Amino acid sequence: MIEITETEALNRVAAYCAASEHCRAEIAEKLQRWGIDYTAIDRILKHLEKEKYIDEERFCRAFIRDKYRFAKWGKMKIGQALQLKKIPSAVYASYLNEIDEEEYLSILRDLLASKRKSVRAGNEFELNGKLIRFALSRGFEMKDIRHCMDVSDENEYPE
């Protein structure tokens, strides 16, 4: 394994952070893989934070926006992913609550509608069970799933 100096490591991760948003835990993990000692990692992270290369709040806003708009994840799954990145819930909870409710439900409705076309089920009960499990696996809460399923049922079966 090639030895890498603290300065080289700092320059590399600074360039990495300049290219896209990363959290403190991701950078620390990368530096550990490179064999940098823990005191040097701490100094590098402090420098990156001071120079605004890494900012947990900015990372949270970008991560949340990307995951619910592009990956179509629900709030539960986004929260779990942020916890895995060692970000405290106090940092990300307010940003999760800032998600536009109409846009969020619209994404869920579209997901359910497209999944409904591809699901094979013997009856409506089985179909709804599969759709609910699918939406739960995407990290949506049961109250939101129920709301969207009720709306979609009303639209599909007028009385």
Image (cartoon, helix red, strand yellow):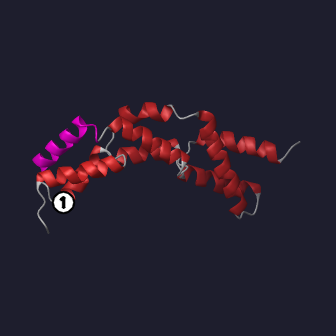
What is the span of residues highlighted in magenta in the rendered image?
38-53
Confirm whether the magenta stretch covers residue 15.
no
Q: Judge left or right: residue 60 versus residue 104.
A: left
Q: Judge left or right: residue 34 versus residue 53.
A: left
Name the quarter where the N terminus is drawn: bottom left
Give the residue drawn at x 23%, y 41%: 48
Q: Judge left or right: residue 102 versus residue 45.
A: right
Residue 158 versus residue 73: which sits nearer the camera? 73
Name the quarter where the C terminus is drawn: top right
- Give the image location of residue 140, x and y in percent: 56, 45
Q: Which residue is mark 1?
A: 34
- Give the image location of residue 91, x and y in percent: 36, 33
Q: In terms of image quadrants, where is residue 125?
A: bottom right
Identify which amino acid the numbered label 1 is placed on: Trp
Give the residue drawn at x 23%, y 50%: 28
Q: In terms of image quadrants, where is residue 4?
A: bottom left
Confirm whether the magenta stretch covers residue 48.
yes
Farthest right residue? Answer: 159
Residue 20 versus residue 117: which sits nearer the camera? 20
Sort mark 1 into few (<14), some (14-19) or many (20+) by Cα contacts within 10 Å. some
